[in-house]
Image: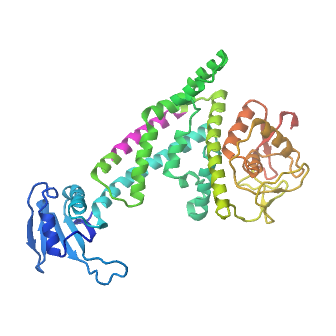
């Protein structure tokens, strides 16, 4: 905490103030600035006037030389400095002073040079915001690992989130990244909240229920809707997040966080609001975490969750298509060539053993259709936005099983490289594959690699062992 709190402004071109003395008197005469209390004008050791208010608050003014300005004619400019040993008097004084300078003295330009009050508020808010942000990260990791598995990030994050995080991982690598999975650590504050908002089967939002009711024609469809409304997943997120206005609270906290990040001006009301939001969000997240183990998902819930996630991906697909069209129209390239790689038959690595070893070779940007009985597989485009269907998964798995460079199809490789390479969104592909496994349309089994570790592999039930 500073010994004195300082609020300093650059004040440029007032209506009819030309010197330091006139400016001091124009400030001291305002009842609005001083709340009806008359301050004292006194002199410093150099004989310059300054204002002495209550609680030790002082206001000084220094003339700024404007004679050497190149592009504008500025008749007068001043540095106005307010100091106080106490936070409380200066915090509201700033706004009263600014209103007087703008509305009454009509300065053409006002710029903040130093604002210790905003810095103090931001310094008090940041640890609380950071604690809530890390608490939600902890919750998301625990919840989705227990309900989705080790690949939960690829399943739950949208393609846009995944792309953003990968770019940050490349640009901000640190020592921790060598030892941990650091995807969610690079996710935006807003995206962390979105991972909660979008966890919906589409049936815990009243407008979605009404929309669905308008399309129901049979008693069977009505019973299905009722079942979805009563599902554990829907109840869980409705009870612990939606009913407690988590989305609204998180977005309000996000606005304050963005101001902290950009060193914006803060007021005491925002400090109080930030503290209240921190307490509310902490309580919500901790209670939701306490009840994680209570959720048991039905197959229908998993299917509904998959459909809700697919809608999000389709929306991002439309946005990406619009952006790509704008880039092309503007003459900007929308794809870049990365390190060339070719995936070869049967090679694996202990660290990422569902993938094939990447060897140096040519890389082609774009989608490649793989023919049957090919002996290489080219790793090309990054994860895309296409939502795959159950029929397409079955067809693609049949094709992958007939590639002659491998005797098995690793689940992770199949989803994150083979299908992602064809433009399919990783998250919705993973969730649909898991549903097809539960429906026994696809068989999940363990394959022992030559190195002795187990790989999760997939095959069609008729493909044998």
Question: Outermost residue, bottom direction?
Answer: 68
Based on the displayed image, in which of its 4 quarters is residue 35 positioned? bottom left
Based on the displayed image, in which of its 4 quarters is residue 465 positioned? top right
The quadrant in which the N terminus is found is bottom left
**Residue 55 at x, y percent in the picture:** 13, 59
Placement of 142 over or under 5, stated as above or below:
above
Magenta stretch: dominant secondary structure: helix
In-image side of 15 versus 302 (left or right): left
**Residue 150 at x, y percent in the picture:** 64, 45
Is residue 175 covered in magenta?
Answer: no
Name the foreground residue: 42 vs 347: 42
Q: Residue at x 65, y 47 (%)?
A: 317
Name the foreground residue: 73 vs 251: 73
Q: Residue at x 38, y 61 (%)?
A: 263
Q: Is residue 384 visible?
A: yes
Q: In the rendered structure, which segment of residues is drawn in magenta? A: 275-292
Is residue 285 covered in magenta?
Answer: yes
In-image side of 191 versus 223 (left or right): left
In-image side of 180 versus 247 (left or right): right
């Amino acid at each position: 905490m500073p010994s004195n709190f300082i609020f300093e402004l650059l004040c440029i071109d007032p209506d009819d103030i030309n010197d330091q003395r006139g400016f001091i008197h124009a400030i001291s005469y305002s009842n609005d600035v001083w709340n009806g209390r008359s301050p004292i004008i006194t002199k410093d050791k150099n004989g310059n006037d300054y204002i002495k208010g209550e609680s030790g608050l002082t206001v000084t003014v220094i003339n700024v030389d404007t004679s050497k300005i190149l592009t504008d004619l500025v008749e007068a400019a001043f540095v106005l400095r307010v100091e106080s040993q106490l936070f409380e008097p200066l915090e509201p004084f700033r706004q009263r002073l600014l209103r007087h300078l703008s509305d009454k003295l009509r300065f053409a330009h006002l710029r903040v040079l130093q604002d210790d009050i905003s810095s103090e508020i931001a310094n008090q808010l940041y640890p609380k915001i950071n604690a809530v942000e890390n608490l939600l990260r902890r919750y998301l990791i625990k919840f989705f690992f227990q309900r989705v598995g080790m690949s939960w990030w690829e399943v739950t994050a949208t393609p846009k989130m995944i792309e953003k995080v990968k770019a940050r991982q490349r640009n901000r690598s640190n020592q921790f990244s060598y030892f941990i999975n650091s995807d969610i650590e690079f996710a935006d504050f807003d995206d962390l909240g979105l991972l909660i908002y979008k966890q919906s089967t589409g049936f815990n939002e009243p407008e979605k229920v009404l929309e669905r009711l308008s399309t129901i024609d049979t008693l069977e469809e009505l019973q299905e809707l009722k079942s979805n409304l009563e599902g554990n997943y829907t109840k869980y997120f409705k009870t612990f997040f939606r009913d407690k206005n988590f989305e609204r609270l998180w977005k309000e906290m996000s606005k304050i966080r963005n101001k902290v990040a950009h060193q914006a001006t803060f007021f005491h009301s925002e400090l109080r609001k930030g503290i209240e939001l921190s307490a509310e969000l902490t309580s919500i997240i901790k209670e939701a975490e306490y009840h994680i183990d209570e959720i048991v998902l039905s197959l229908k819930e998993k299917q509904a969750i998959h459909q809700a996630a697919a809608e999000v991906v389709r929306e991002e697909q439309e946005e990406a298509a619009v952006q790509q069209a704008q880039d092309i129209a503007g003459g900007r390239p929308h794809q870049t060539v990365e390190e060339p790689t070719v995936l070869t038959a049967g090679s694996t690595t202990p660290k990422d053993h569902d993938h094939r070893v990447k060897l140096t070779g040519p890389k082609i940007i774009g989608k490649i259709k793989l023919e049957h009985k090919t002996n290489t597989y080219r790793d090309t485009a990054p994860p895309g936005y296409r939502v795959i269907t159950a029929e397409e998964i079955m067809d693609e798995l049949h094709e992958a099983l007939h590639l002659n460079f491998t005797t098995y199809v690793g689940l992770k490789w199949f989803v994150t490289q083979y299908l992602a390479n064809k433009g399919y969104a990783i998250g919705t592909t993973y969730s649909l594959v898991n549903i097809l496994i539960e429906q026994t349309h696809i068989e999940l089994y363990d394959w022992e690699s030559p190195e002795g570790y187990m790989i999760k592999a997939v095959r069609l039930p008729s493909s044998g062992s």
